[in-house]
Structure formats: C-alpha cells, structure tokens
Amino acid sequence: MSDKNLKIGIIGAGIQGVCNALFLQKKGYQVILFDRDEPGNAASYGNAGHFSPYASVPLNRPDILSDVPAMLMSSRGPLALKWNYVPKMIPWFSRFVVNCTKNKMMHTAKYMHQILDQSLIAYDELFDEIDLEGLVENNGILYIWNEKNLKSRELEIKIREELGVKQQIVNKKEIHDLEPNLKPIYSGGVFYDYARHARNPKKILVKLFENFIKKGGKFLKLNIQDLNFDESKPVLRSETQRFVFDKLVIACGAFSKKLTDKLHESIPLDTERGYHIHFKDFDHLISRPVVNSNRGFGMSPMDQGLRVVGTVEFGGLENALSKNRIKNLILNAKEMLDGLPEHKDEWLGFRPTLPDFLPVIGPSKNYENVYYSFGHHHLGWTLGAISGKIVSGMIANENTNMDLKPYSSVRFAQ
C-alpha cells in the first residue's frame, strides 16, 4: 500500500484534532475525524482565545510550591481544589512536586519555547486557506501585576530573556496608555505586541473544520467506546460500528487518558478545570486581552462580549461547576473595570495537564501505529497547528530540526 493511501483516524474534533487532520490532508492521507460532540464545543470554544508564542514559562516552578497553601485558602486566589477529588490527585501532585526544581522548570521552558516559537507560522499555513473575516486581531496581549509576588514576575521575565523571547516591560503610564479603562491597581507589566487573539475561537475552529470537509475529509459524530488492534492496525468501536485504520491519532484533550489506559500506558494526565463568563456588549472596554498575573485570570474582547476567563481548579471531569469560581471571576473583573453589568452565561472546561507541563506529542510507547497530541494545558489553542504539523511529519517519516524526544510518552515510563 502506498503511504498516500493510508487511512488515518483521529479521535477528538477540538483544535488539536482538526489541526492534525488538516496537516495530514496536506500530505495526501485519507482522514476520518471522530467526536461524540460537534466540533468546537469543548475547550476549543471556551478558552481565552490567546495565540501566545511567548508563554514558555511553566507552572512547575520552585516558587509556586510555597504559594500553593495561600492560594488554596484564598477565595479570590487563582487556585482551587474540589476536596472530594484529593485522593485521586495525590499521585499527580506528587509528580508535580518532583518537577518543581530549577532544572526541570528550565527543561520544560526550553521545550515549550521550541514549539511555541513555531506556533504562529504553523497557524498561518492553515489560515491562508480560509477567510478569517476579522476573527483574529493583532493588537498584542498585556500582562499586569501589582507589587505582590514580584519575585515570581521577575523570574518569569528572566527565563524569557534567557530563551530569547521578545518582551516589552511596561510601567504604569504605558499600561494606562494601552488600556485607559483599567483601574490603576497595577504597578507594572509586560506587553507582547506580536501576540494575537481570537474574536471567536469556535468560529475559527469551525472554519478550519469546514475546510477539512471541503478537501475530502470525513467526520463521524460517534462516541468511541473501545480501542483494540487487528494485528497491528488500530480498531475503533462505537456502540454500533467498527472501524479499522492504518494509523490513529488520539487528540481528545483531558479525555485522552481513557484511551491511553487501554494501550497500557500509565500517562499521568489530569485536568485543570477552567471557567469563563461574558459581560455582553462590553468588549469595547479593552483593546486586547489583559491578564492579571496576581489573580491568575484574564479578560479578552470577543464577539460574545468581554470574556473573563481563568482560574485553576483541580476536581476531575465529573464534578459540577463551582459557583465560587464564577463569583471569583466576577469580583476580579469588577476590581479592574468600572461599569460592568450582570454577567451572561457560565462555562466550565477542562485543560488536559501533565505534571511536567509538557504536552505529549508523538507515537505511543507500545503501539507504533498510534500517535498522541494532547496535554497542552493552558496552551492547547496556541499549540494546535504546530502539534498537528509535528504529528503529520512523524507519520510521513519526515526529518525535522526539532528535538522531539521531550514530548514523548516514554518519559513517564522512566
């Protein structure tokens, strides 16, 4: 069989799955995309919309550990925990603590930077084929902070400087000039003028998906319930159907672990639960995304209004939405902007996160015809295109000038 006749299945129709599908199509492969929901209804809908090529500084940092107790105790802090989930989180937290050393932090930062540095270029390859109709804005992204935890901010700036990340340190006046409607609660910040943001992440994903279909791709709205093999070929089963592929890509975010467990890989994937609300018709208050580093949340001007998004909650996939986390976002937003009305809609999504804060990109440890593209934590939207490009290159046996070993699932077997 010619390589071009390979039949490839992808589980997951979020930004990772759709970008993998498009790059595989570019190489001439036949691709079928599966999801139990319509494309773009999960994390690819509810995220902050940031294209963040600068965001190489990970959360597995030595300074984070000392801050965790205070974060958990504060109702206004960026971190929360569903206490009924604590027993299940202990193994993940144990691995996270082990990764909170300077060497591990710099390892993650280096290899996040490697793919982030190529992230916008990879998106441009896909965006050149669709009409974005003003859905992506190039006004940069602004981070602000007050004088609390300045050592953490200084550490972030230093790491990015060492990696060669372009950043513009801004003072109070410069922040005011960029965003005059912000209340003067900040002491400084950093501005990434080359960063972009999505006015409507779901619309962008749907346009990419429609291009995949237009080019001959197929989508099946099915809940894949089982994965096994016919000799070496992956076999997928839904409630009523069976599908055999030459290659398979698992790209279903926080739900990927249910499938990798079937492949006898102990990948410590869990979820950081993230929230958003909208203040309808108030997107005009800011000109670009603004992130409050102290509070761990951000605001983005979007078609739906001013989207307020963020916080990290550990609580798995089954716990209900937390009203306290919603309240936290409302209070934080009103602390930064005057005149906000009652909020509209409340959303909970799942960020797939690994304890070393690197994604899993590449072949399964145990099955050569299965590939992974998940675990991108807060950067799944930013890294969709480059992850798809990398996986498609691996399947095509192409050489690359990138070191891809750090993203392998093999690291969890060591």
Image: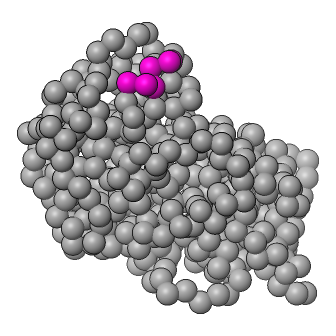
Left or right of residue 272: residue 225: right
| Viewer-proximal residue among 214 and 17 | 214
Decide: is 306 above or below 310.
above
Task: Inspect this view and state whether residue 1 appears.
Answer: yes
| Viewer-proximal residue among 172 and 103 | 172
Task: Inspect this view and state whether residue 263 appears.
Answer: no
Q: Quadrant of residue 291?
A: top left
Q: Quadrant of residue 97?
A: bottom left
Decide: is 328 above or below 240.
above
Residue 371's x, y, as percent? 65, 71
Left or right of residue 355: residue 19: right
Residue at the location (43% across, 65% down)? 116
Q: Quadrant of residue 81?
A: top left
Residue 50's x, y, as percent? 45, 47
Left or right of residue 304: residue 159: left
**Quarter of the image that includes the N terminus:** bottom right
Write the start and end of the magenta stretch as one range: 280-285
| Viewer-proximal residue among 306 and 21 | 306
**Quarter of the image that includes the C terminus:** bottom left
